[in-house]
Image (spheres, helix red, strand yellow):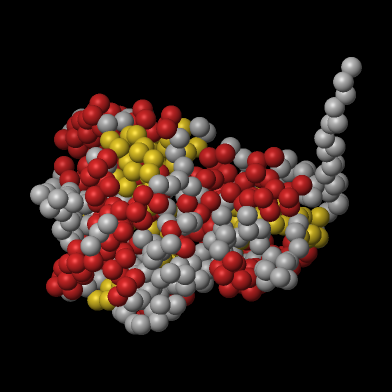
Amino acid sequence: MTRYPLPVLAEPPAAAPGTVYTVASGDLRPRANVTCWPTQQQLEADLAAAVNALGWKVERGHAVDPDKGHGFIDSQRAGIEVFKRLPVDAPLIVVEAVWQYSHHVLAGLRSHRGPILIVANWSGEFPGLVGLLNLTASLTKAGVRHSALWSRDFTDDWAVNGLRTWLETGELRHDTGHVRDLPALPDDAEVELGRALAVQLAREKAVIGVFDEGCMGMYNAIFDDELINPLGIYKERLSQSALVAEMARVPDEEAHAVRRWLDEAGMTFHTGTDEATELTDAQLTSQFKMYIAALRIADDFGLDAVGIQYQQGLKDTVPASDLAEGLLNNVQRPPVRSRDGSRELYAGAPLPHFNEVDEGVAVDSLVTNRIWTAMGLDPATTLHDIRWGETYGDDFVWVFEISGSVPASHNGGYDKSYSMRQPPMFFPLGGGTLSGVSKPGEIVWSRVFIMDGGLHVDLGRATVVELPEEETRRRLEATNPQWPIMHAVLHGVGRDQLMARHKANHVNVAYAPDAETADRALRVKAALFAELGVQVHLCGDVNL
């Protein structure tokens, strides 16, 4: 009888008594990891002090790499190797002061048997809160039990009590009483419209163009065909290399025509000559070629929406995709004609772009576009990162801040919009933003997400407020001054309630001309999703 050598599996170590193990998922971009490392170190020190004060010890699950200059898990393989050396039943804290790629640690967290806590520092300096929300959303999609906690420095009573609860019980629950399931809807014009649009989508079907899936480790942003096909939404899987190839076919003069159109519309470009640190005319020309190329490829495939990953891959090839994305999402935008010049592409309408190929945003933006268009409203929509926030006056005002672009109408027009170079830490080849301060007004906010193997959507209302210029500037400097910002006050949803419930780092927003119209648009949206079989949840104060 033949005997084959069998693999010898290493036994995981036993957990030390009274010990909490920590890991830190990081970026895939080395410069970002090195830049953010001091802030991460401070958070880990603050958390360790709080854990020690509660009578526990902290053991870091992986060493700092002096050659790399940081102590982050910076690849999926590195994460798998780290988790091989961790006790599988030990209490584990994932500590995040930065944006992190969730797939770096997802393999290990899927098989970890001990309690899991995700923590972040309440700071806008680096997007640690954004990273936390992405990881918790990814774990929710994966069906991995976990808890989450956030604090400025883990000395406040709320955070300390939450940490104590988790250490003692292995679980931490937050107040989510602001969430309720959709009640029966009235038979009115809005509900009739929502249901009719749902039937149209399911029967006639839509195609979303995906220029490479899985941006920045966002497992939660990948929606399986089996979930979205029943809605009538299908993917056209495209390669970013095809986008670059199409860009190469765009003549310089066509790109320059886009620039002239934007100059005449009053948009400001903050340009210089240093390619490494400043926004240059050459970078802008490349971005305008991407805008033209995206529309032509979308026309080739009959796309209803499009998403460009950019990270990873394109960041090492061409300047940032953001300026093109912001232009695509606006009704008024530089005209682009077919290759033979015979037709204007998507004339008088946006081509919804889902930033970072977040397919939850794709579903939401597609639906929003159809509803707002049918109601005669401006269909410009965008996502924002839920970046940070603080109390101002009597309200908690969120910093919603997308990492590059919004449709110009959200800023009040191109004359109130500007373009700055993307931060070199994230964007080595530069490229401009489409930035501005979002105008005051009423919005509907939403998120489509995956939980318990099915599609869900959270719907809520908010008011975008105008803050004094000095406060806006302070908030921009506390986060990323190059990026567009929205000052959002959520209706009936507290800071910790949103953090506890929201199943994504992104939130979708769309404006309405007044509160009554926003309420009606939300009702249409609820009816549409419910008709398609998506589980609808209302968040906070929603007037149906």
Q: Is residue 266 left or right of residue 471?
A: left
Q: Where's the C terminus, which quadrant?
A: top left
Looking at the image, which residue is at 11% across and 49% down?
A: 343
Camera-side residue of 460 and 205: 205
Q: Is residue 376 above or below residue 199?
A: below
Q: Is residue 333 left or right of residue 59?
A: left
Task: Name the residue at the left extreme.
Answer: 342
State which quadrant residue 423 falls in: bottom left
Q: Is residue 160 above or below residue 281?
A: above
Camera-side residue of 136 and 256: 256
Camera-side residue of 522 and 23: 23
Q: Is residue 125 above or below residue 16?
A: below
Q: Position of residue 203 (x, y in %)?
A: 25, 26
Q: Position of residue 36 (x, y in %)?
A: 59, 70
Q: Is residue 225 above or below residue 414?
A: above
Q: Is residue 542 left or right of residue 265?
A: right
Q: Position of residue 369 (x, y in %)?
A: 24, 46
Looking at the image, which residue is at 36% across and 37% down?
A: 235
Residue 68 appears in the figure: yes
State which quadrant residue 398 falls in: bottom left
Residue 407 appears in the figure: no
Q: Position of residue 451 (x, y in %)?
A: 50, 37
Looking at the image, which residue is at 65% across and 44% down?
A: 107
Looking at the image, which residue is at 35% across and 62% down?
A: 322
Q: Is residue 461 left or right of residue 347?
A: right
Q: How many marks?
A: 0
Task: Name the residue at the top extreme.
Answer: 1
Q: Where's the N terminus, which quadrant?
A: top right
